[in-house]
Image (spheres, rainbow, N blue to C red):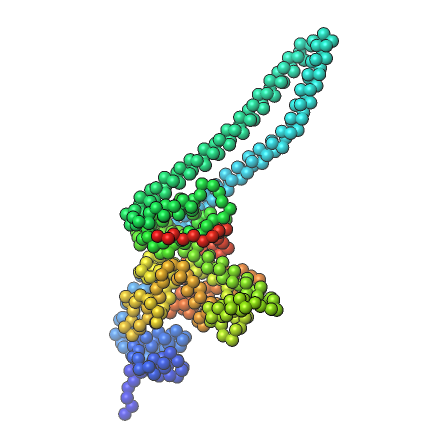
Amino acid sequence: MKKKLTYRDKLLELAKIYNVKEIQDYIKSKKSLTSGQIELILRKNKIIIPKDFQTNFYKENVTKPLSKVSRQIENLKEDSIKSVNRFSRQVNYFKEDSKISFKNFIYNIWKLVGRVGLGFLDVLPRAGKAISNFISSSFVELFNEIYNQKINVGKANKAIIGFFIIIGVGTIIVSGVNVYKNSEKFFERNKTIKTEDKIKKLDSQTQKKAKKPEPKLKQELQKVEPKKKEEKVAEVILPNLNLKTETVLNLFKDVDYDLNTVRYEKKVKPIYFTQFPRDLDEIQSVKLKKETFIKIVLPLIVAENEKILADRSKLKKITSRRITSDEEKQWLRQKFLEYKVKKSDVEELGNRMDIIPTSIALAQAAKESGWGTSRFALEGNAIFGQWTWTGRGIAPLDRDKTKNHKILKFPILRASVKAYKNNLNTHKSYVKFRNKRKELRQKNKKISGLELTKTLDNYAETGSEYTKILAQIINQNRLMDFELVTLTNSGKKRQLDL
């Protein structure tokens, strides 16, 4: 008599028929898989499970209908929440656009006034010449009349009045110039005083958590906001001081760090945080929390991209020459190791040595770290949720007992960004991503984040659903605005030694 197969056995037979290597490897390693795990792997490999495999009457007629109804209710709730959020975002966008339009209007008015002023200054030399001719002719006629002893009273009065009018106009112009210069000095001095007051407040807040580092932090913040405009902006790396979110927000305010300005000017200051504020999740405003997260992560992503572009430019120069120096050969060997390129394939190195679009990096960082509030982000500076089986990491609390992976831990935030970019540029799971990026390069097209999100279905177990979420984050938060952002001209790198 033929033995009746269980539902799990049927799934294993189906995996054997379609030659699913992942399940076969688990069986060879004598690891036990549950029915749910086998189902997940089969669906991941796009294998349809026949309906007649489902033999549990209770599951089919009771559990599934109830779960379906609950899902519909949850979807209805999510749709209503999304519609409310969408409306609030539209209102916020309208406010932001209105502010930008008003700023542009004021800026255009100011430019128009400046042009009128310059035109007036341009007319002054001609007016001066005409006035001098008038004065000379008037004096000649006056003295001529005196000499001939035939004084014309009307002309004499006109000459005297004209002389005093000229003196008055000249005095007003000189006084106006002096007042303008003094007002500029006053506003600049007032701004400096306000900045110093803000720094003192910032220091008093920081004293509670870090008493020893306070003087050097003050000195560094004073360097961030100089009294005079400088052509170069130095990099500032803030150390692990367990800063509160309020202190971080005050710092952003002191250095005029505004995302709308970054979107408009396509420039961001090189301010590098080594960790997230521990109380970031306590911010009530979702918009403010997201903006704070973007302000912290954006300079780190842009800095790594600019470093990659510099390496890419150097590679192009080296490969364009027939003879390379020993130093250049050593540099190439290091890059082959860094990007895991075999057989010294220069073309493959050029394919891998390229940027990750800023919008994608920001969206994945937000998704994987919960906008900087996850346990992995706060305890291990893990922004992108990279797994490890051998390295130093943090074990997930909801990890399956059959698994032994951890979330890779980093000493500082920038190390996490660097590891993430190296992962996308070297791992075999992201070949589609790199090939699509190469195709855009060859066609001289913009490397668009939304275009490349479709190739990242292997980054998470949810596959295509994950890429849809990334695209949604990019669109909802207008992350495409940061694609062309670069660092402001930076001088020598400075770090706080505390």
Give the side of residue 250 with respect to residue 148, left or right.
left
Which residue is painted at 42% across and 58% down in the image?
362
Q: Position of residue 386 (x, y in %)?
A: 37, 66
Give the side of residue 437 with respect to residue 122, left or right.
left
Residue 66: name its quadrant: bottom left
172 to 460, vertically: above or below:
above
Q: Position of residue 223 (x, y in %)?
A: 42, 46
Residue 4: name its quadrant: bottom left
Which of 424/16 is in front? 424
Which residue is painted at 58% across and 36% down in the image?
115
- Among all residues in the image, which is located at the extreme top? 149
Which residue is painted at 33% across and 42% down in the image?
201
Which of 406/42 is in front? 406
150 to 365, vertically: above or below:
above
Which residue is painted at 25% across and 74% down in the image?
58
130 to 158, vertically: above or below:
below
Placement of the N terminus among the 4 image quadrants: bottom left
Q: Residue 185: in sight, yes or no?
A: yes
Q: Position of residue 195 (x, y in %)?
A: 40, 40
Which of 417/399 is in front? 417
Give the side of residue 52 with respect to residue 184, left or right.
left
Give the total of numbered labels.
0
Q: Residue 449: in sight, yes or no?
A: no
Q: Position of residue 439 (x, y in %)?
A: 54, 67
- Among all residues in the image, which is located at the extreme bottom? 1
- Among all residues in the image, which is located at the extreme right? 148
